[in-house]
Image (cartoon, coloured by chain):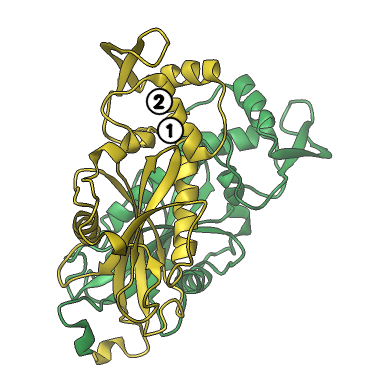
Chain colours: A green, B yellow
Amino acid sequence: MNTKYEGFETPGITVDLSIFTVNETRLKVMLVRRAEVPFQGYWSLPGGFLKTSESLDAAAQRVLCEKSGVSDVYMEQLYTFGDPKRDPRSRVITVAYIALIPWQSLPQPASEKVTDLTWASVDALPKLAFDHREILSYAVKRLRAKVSYSNIVYGLMPKQFRLSELQSMYETIIDDKLDKRNFRKQMLATGLLKETGKKELAGAHRPAMLYQFKSKEIVFFN
Amino acid sequence: MNTKYEGFETPGITVDLSIFTVNETRLKVMLVRRAEVPFQGYWSLPGGFLKTSESLDAAAQRVLCEKSGVSDVYMEQLYTFGDPKRDPRSRVITVAYIALIPWQSLPQPASEKVTDLTWASVDALPKLAFDHREILSYAVKRLRAKVSYSNIVYGLMPKQFRLSELQSMYETIIDDKLDKRNFRKQMLATGLLKETGKKELAGAHRPAMLYQFKSKEIVFFN
């Protein structure tokens, strides 16, 4: 123990990830089953301890890649949870991240150890380890808020899509229905989309224009 | 050293606060002069090490109260900065917070040790210790973004105010001019304000209605 820090905390640091995808019009989050105590056998958010000389973002990327098999996806730091009692072992502070993966980009099956990893609907969660329920609630809240004032939804969409698919994505995330005409008008007014020039047949309807996001950087609008 | 954590970080944890106020139509942030190495004599954001068994929010409140003399003000966690090289002594991760104080609520003078504490305009900053310039840039960006989709500005306003004073506050924060008619219309349309029923003389103009925010909790609009 470094005496310089006497009376002060030198806690373990973890990163915990709320990795979202949308499949079958459900917002889903990756959960992993804990092999060890505490909370052995419980589902939890994927995470891990910060390694020596590792940056927080690098640790989050490492966990993302290990668990999902993908790396080049939208990720942002969410919030840091530091309640003194959140880990029964010792003081552990966790820096929470959000990551978004288009369902189409996920390797199938998403993991070799399939029984230890699942994609759970955020409205039908099992009991979670630690304060992961609280962290996940905060992550869902952030995602729901952010779709209304940014292009963050691009992180969940395939490269090209019909406007009706984009509307369905929004409806799934905010868990509400949107008016088709208003949605199209407002979405196009943001200036964030561009036509690909290609059209796609969708059921019995006329071929619909395929769009893509102009930017794969986060942009805010209002 | 706990061998359980070998290969993992057990860093010092600090909180650092960007405490904002607005005075003389300038967005200002509290800076304190460092008495000790490293960066001795440099200006820095007020902060401190996390104490044993102290929550992050409690540490931020403690620093806020010690430095500003006030406690019941708007505060939110901003972001956690954990670059491995950000502190030349050893690994220190800092959880950054934003606090907002109405100028009228500040004890005057704001500190006994006046030479060690200043309110600097965010557009005329001295050289800052550590990565505090980066932290502060992020804090200003968050504040500027958040005024456009929430009522966060209440944290900087006196209890009652004329709409022209509120407009001036917005203009100071976003560093831009706003159209008076549109501002009044949009602001009243958010439903976040209520008339106090009282009017106040303002210069040579007709007495103007005094308003207040309905809620002192953060509310989002769009």
Q: Which residue is mark 2?
A: B165
The image shows residue B58 at horizontal and vertical percentages of 19, 58
- Residue at horizontal 64 percent and vertical 52 percent from the top: A217
Residue nearer the viewer, A1 or B74: B74
Residue under label 1, please give it.
Answer: B169
Q: Residue at x 70, y 50 (%)?
A: A159
Does the image show residue B56?
yes
Name the foreground residue: A212 vs A84. Answer: A84
Q: Residues within 10 Å of mark 2 (few under 14, many from 20)?
A: some
Give the amino acid at mark 2: Glu
> Looking at the image, which residue sits at the far right?
A197
Q: Image quarter for residue B24?
A: top left
Q: CA distance from mark 1 to mark 2?
A: 6 Å
Q: Residues within 10 Å of mark 1 (few under 14, many from 20)?
A: many
Report in which chain the residue with disc 2 lies.
B
Q: Badges 1 and 2: C-beta atoms under 8 Å apart?
A: yes
Parent chain of label 1 = B
Identify the mark at residue B127; answer none if there is no mark. none
Q: Quadrant of the N terminus of chain B?
A: bottom left
Q: Secondary structure at mark 2?
A: helix
* Whole-percent x, y for residue A162 in the image: 70, 36
Is residue B142 depicted above or below A176 in this figure? Answer: below
A104 relative to A28 in the view: left or right = right
